Image (spheres, helix red, strand yellow):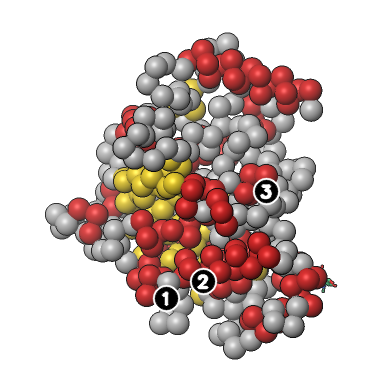
Amino acid sequence: MMAGAAAAALLVIFLAAVSGEAGPALPRFAEAPQYRNGEGCPAPSGAGVCDPGLVHIAMTLDAHYLRGSMAAIYSLLKHASCPESLSFHFLAAATSAPPDDADDDLPALRRALAASFPSLRFQIYPFRAASVTGLISASVRAALEAPLNYARNHLADLLPPCVPRAIYLDSDVLAADDVRRLWETRLPAAAVVAAPEYCHANFSRYFTPAFWSDPELGARVFAGRRRPPCYFNTGVMVVDLRRWRAGNYRRRIERWMEIQKEKRIYELGSLPPFLLVFAGEVEAVDLRWNQHGLGGDNVHGSCRPLHDGPVSLMHWSGKGKPWDRLDAGRPCPLDHTWKSYDLYIPGDGSGAASPASGPAALSASW
Ligand SMILES: *[C@@H]1O[C@H](CO)[C@@H](O)[C@H](O)[C@H]1NC(C)=O
């Protein structure tokens, strides 16, 4: 605790020292190596973000997790056969309301992305926490209550209507394969979301005994679904945005968040409402696309190995983040893989102060 407080104080001093007058300072990042489309990639149609040849990737973006986002973007570009066809949609935490948005990180985040990835195709969408704070209930880990965790519920509202589908990714992932393979997941007519499913996980424990014993809730909620309900992780999802809009799925998720305010039906943050709406309805994606849990559990963040089988995407879900463990000099074996995508340039004389850590860290996952 003392070490944590000291580190937090150091961080404040560090940020104050590098902070100019133009809004909050961000950490510095190196420019990523250049990337180009290979042979056989779709030719640009001139339709901008509506170009049908694009692969759309949505992620949250904020100062605290920027280091993770940078590594994730770099890994996606590096392993893509058509990197110039990747179109990024960043949902960024906006603190103040327009037009008085001088305190926002948005212009600085935009500059940081453009500096590290000069030809990146991206848009930033301000996500205002006020749109969800009234719906958020206390959870088992403070970071899971951060409003930006709920931004994924708003994808279909924020992205342009011509974008038919998006891959949502958490900021603590690394791609090890061409993301176009995930993009080309077939979604049968009944499915709105595709994600790796974990049917061996004990589904009951994601909800409270009060939920299971409530005569209106419990197993009744999942009756009549396409398949038996299974746990899936919302950190890697393929979302059909048109079907999402047509079915008003944000509202369906928010209804569960309202019920949670009245009766405590779950303990985690943004995940259980997704399970309540989609478990048993999601289209299963190969587990290789979410080798999750590398951040350890929600309490200690201990080291975890990869699961058996092939790896297309690594996910540091859980409490421990590779950048924090590397900075603390206690990396887990797999954190060295993450390190090879780290673009962060440590600040002068403050090697231990990771700008990406701290109690306010957002966009966390399980
Ligand atoms: C699953 O979890 C529930 C609630 O925690 C528990 O009562 C049940 O015994 C567990 N089932 C199995 C098969 O472990």
Labelled disc at residue 247:
1
Left or right, 295 with respect to 245, comes to right
Residue shown at 41% from the left, 82% from the top: 189
Residue where numbered disc 3 is placed = 318
Which image quadrant: the N terminus?
top right
Mark whose residue sits in front, 1 or 3: 1
CA separation, marks 1 and 2? 9 Å
In the shown orientation, is residue 50 left or right of residue 18? left
Towards the viewer: 43 or 258: 258
Q: Which residue is painted at 48% across and 15% down in the image?
A: 18
Is 80 positioned to the left or the right of 347 in the image?
left
Can the viewer see residue 40 in this picture? no
Residue annotated with mark 2? 252
> Mark 3: few, some, or many residues within 10 Å (few <14, many ≥20)?
many
C-alpha gap between disc 2 and disc 3: 26 Å
State the image coordinates of residue 198 (x, y, percent, origin top left). Answer: 65, 68
Could you say whether the residue bearing mark 1 is in a helix, strand or loop? Answer: loop
Front residue of 364/120: it is 364
- Tell me if the residue at label 1 has its CB under 8 Å from ligand 1: no
Q: Are marks 1 and 3 in contact (CB under 8 Å)?
A: no
User: Disc count in the image?
Assistant: 3
At x 64%, y 77%, the residue is 229
